[in-house]
Image (cartoon, rainbow, N blue to C red):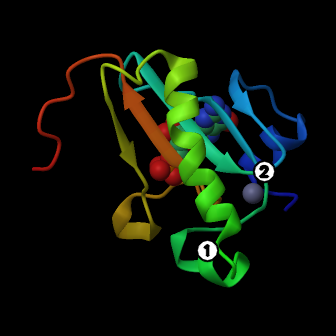
Amino acid sequence: MDSCVFCKIIAGDLPSTRVYEDDKVIAFKDLNPVAPVHVLVVPRQHIVSINEFAEQDPAGELAIHLMNCIPKVAEACGVVESGYRLINNCGKDGGQTVPHFHIHIIGGEDLGPGLR
Ligand code: 5GP
Ligand code: ZN
């Protein structure tokens, strides 16, 4: 996807600070962190949001792989013991600003109860 900022990061056409990568997934530091640890876990495959995921990944292999990567990324970021929060924003009201599916991993401090 030529116009997608995360596809450009995945391709290496835009710089990022990668903390984890394998053949299906990369994780890199968010440009505007909201906590000491704030990374984005992103499938290499361009999937717009969770709404399109099952259609693009019918066997669920990527979904399982991505889920299983989360603790590895958390470990790489040093928050696996202290804990962390996962966020996925979907669509307009969900506050999604980049239309390439991604999971935020946020931590490195006490995040409080989270939901309003
Ligand atoms: P969303 O709002 O879609 O859930 O999250 C998009 C995230 O991507 C935001 O937290 C934003 O700071 C981050 N972001 C947007 N553009 C870039 C970029 O070019 N590089 C990096 N590392 N993060 C970005
Ligand atoms: Zn993309």
User: Is disc 1 surrounded by few (<14), some (14 to 19) or many (20+) residues within 10 Å?
Assistant: some
Helix, strand or loop at mark 2:
loop
Residue at 76% across / 63% down in the picture?
46
Which amino acid lies under the numbered mark 2 shown in the image of this protein? Lys
Write down which quadrant ligand 1 falls in. Answer: top right
Q: Which residue is pictured at 82% across the width and 33% down the height?
A: 14
Picture quarter containing residue 45? bottom right
The spot of residue 111 in percent (x, y) is 21, 28
Say which of 87 and 4 sits in front: 87
Check disc 1 and give the amino acid type: Phe
Residue at screen point 43% across, 55% down: 88
Q: Earlier in the sequence, mark 2 or mark 1?
A: 2
Residue, disc 1: 53
Q: Is residue 96 above or below residue 54?
A: above
With respect to residue 64, does 44 lie above or below? above
Q: Residues within 10 Å of mark 2 (few under 14, many from 20)?
A: few
Toward which corner of the image does residue 21 lie, by quadrant?
A: top right
Q: Nearer the viewer, residue 43 or 12?
A: 43
Quadrant in the rendering for residue 1? bottom right
Q: Secondary structure at mark 1?
A: helix
Mark 2 or 1: in front is 2
Residue 38: x %, y % from top left: 46, 27
Judging by the rendered image, the residue that carries numbered circle 2 is 24
Task: Count all numbered tags in the image, as a single digit.
Answer: 2
Q: Compute the Cα span from label 2 to label 1.
A: 14 Å
